[in-house]
Image: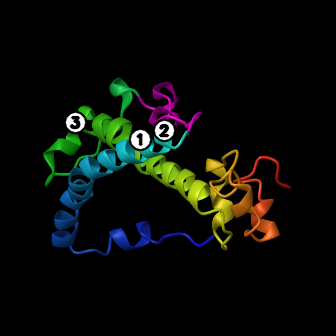
Amino acid sequence: MDRVKIGCNYVKQPFWKVILGVPLIYLPIITTVPFVVMGVFLIKTHLKNVGGMNIKSYWDFVPDWVSHRYVNAEQPTIDLPWYQPAHYRFFWVLNCKHYCPLSVALFRYTTYLVMIVENWWCPFAHDKKQDYAEAAIDKSFWHVHPEELKKLDPADRLNPIWNEKGKP
């Protein structure tokens, strides 16, 4: 697996770039989360209106609070003279226990819902489709219409990601 290179380059960055980069952690979340939440609501409504059941909830993607290694009393802090909030445990608790896992969960949940939509409406294989197995469904739109099912390639007709009776 190729790793993203960041730690080896961080210490080489000019101070002004690091200072400029810090607020860029939050701006994308602040600007996208309202739209992503609205999208999640719309996608879930769509899925329920076409008959979707047993759809995981957002909370299935959020790690259990007890699984976090640190609690407030022992949360590590860092002494950055130029960024005072970093000195306080509540700053790291907010970031590490709330911002990071809740944000990642929101985007993972959105991806999961979109994969369900894709499996329902588009049961056609491509080289990344096996990654959609996390959002496997019982039957695709094409599988509930026998006359349309005949149009599918046999591999698509029998794919277990969108046909629970398909071949593994």
Q: Is 30 or 14 nearer to us in this picture?
A: 30
Task: Pinpoint residue 13: horizontal percent, then vertical percent.
Answer: 27, 74
Q: Dots 1 and 2: beta carbons under 8 Å?
A: yes
In reply to whether residue 62 is colored magenta, the answer given is: yes
- Locate the C terminus and report the quarter of the image it occupies: bottom right
What separation in Å lies between label 3 and label 1 (alpha carbons)?
Answer: 41 Å
Q: Is mark 1 on a helix, strand or loop?
A: helix
Task: Pinpoint residue 136: horizontal percent, then vertical percent.
Answer: 66, 49
Counting other residues with Cα less than 10 Å from the Cα at mark 3, is it few (<14), some (14-19), or many (20 or more)?
Answer: some
What separation in Å lies between label 3 and label 2 (alpha carbons)?
Answer: 44 Å
Q: Is mark 3 on a helix, strand or loop?
A: loop
- Locate the N terminus and report the quarter of the image it occupies: bottom right
Task: Pinpoint residue 19: horizontal percent, then vertical percent.
Answer: 17, 64
Task: Pinpoint residue 52: horizontal percent, then vertical percent.
Answer: 55, 39
Provide the residue designation for mark 3.
Answer: 88
Say what amino acid the circle numbered 3 marks. Tyr
- The magenta stretch is 52-70
Q: Which of marks 3 and 2 is nearer the N terminus?
A: 2
Provide the residue designation for mark 2.
Answer: 48
Provide the residue designation for mark 1.
Answer: 45
Counting other residues with Cα less than 10 Å from the Cα at mark 1, is it few (<14), some (14-19), or many (20 or more)?
Answer: few
Q: Dots 3 and 2: beta carbons under 8 Å?
A: no
Colour scheme: rainbow
Marks 3, 2: nearer the viewer:
2
Left or right position of 93 against 65 = left
What separation in Å lies between label 1 and label 2 (alpha carbons)?
Answer: 5 Å
Marks 3, 1: nearer the viewer:
1
Image quadrant assignment for residue 156: bottom right
